[in-house]
Image (cartoon, grey):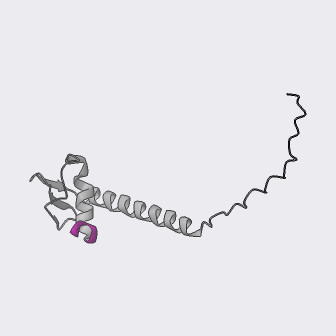
Amino acid sequence: MAANCNPDLILAKTLAAPFTPRSQGNPLSCRRTAEGGMVVIAADGRKLWFDAAEVNRAQLELKVKAQQAEKAENAARKRVPVRLPPPPPEPPQPPHQNNGQW
């Protein structure tokens, strides 16, 4: 649950995703470097180093995804459900008269 709240852990998960199998969980730890990069300890214990360009690219990617999600949410809120009128009742049929003929 902490990965959903901490932006650095979300960024670390995004950076480490290509290097960890899908069965692995969230990164164990992460920290920013003085140069603007990030060091991530993956769920399998590997230490992954990312430079500032990779971190900036991942932040931009996350920002774009968040903006797209916000736009989609706003569009969904603006949609008005369409209410279709019920079909008209069928006209009454005259009783079928069978005078012994088929």
Q: Nearer the viewer, residue 81 or 33?
A: 81
Per the picture, the main secondary structure of the magenta-coloured stretch is helix
The N terminus sits in image quarter: bottom left
**48 w.r.t. 70: above or below:** above
Q: Residue at x 84, y 52 (%)?
A: 92
Q: Residue at x 23, y 66 (%)?
A: 3
Specify start and end residues of the magenta stretch as a single range.
1-5
Residue furthest toward the top? 102
User: Within the image, what quadrant is residue 15 found in?
Assistant: bottom left
The image shows residue 64 at horizontal and vertical percentages of 42, 61
Instruction: Tell whether 65 sits left or right of 4.
Output: right
Instruction: Tell whether 17 sits left or right of 81.
Output: left
Residue furthest toward the bottom? 5
The image shows residue 53 at horizontal and vertical percentages of 28, 57
Q: Nearer the viewer, residue 54 or 6?
A: 6
The image shows residue 32 at horizontal and vertical percentages of 18, 67
Q: Residue at x 41, y 60 (%)?
A: 65
The image shows residue 57 at horizontal and vertical percentages of 33, 57
Residue furthest toward the left? 45
The C terminus sits in image quarter: top right
State yes or no: residue 7 in magenta. Answer: no
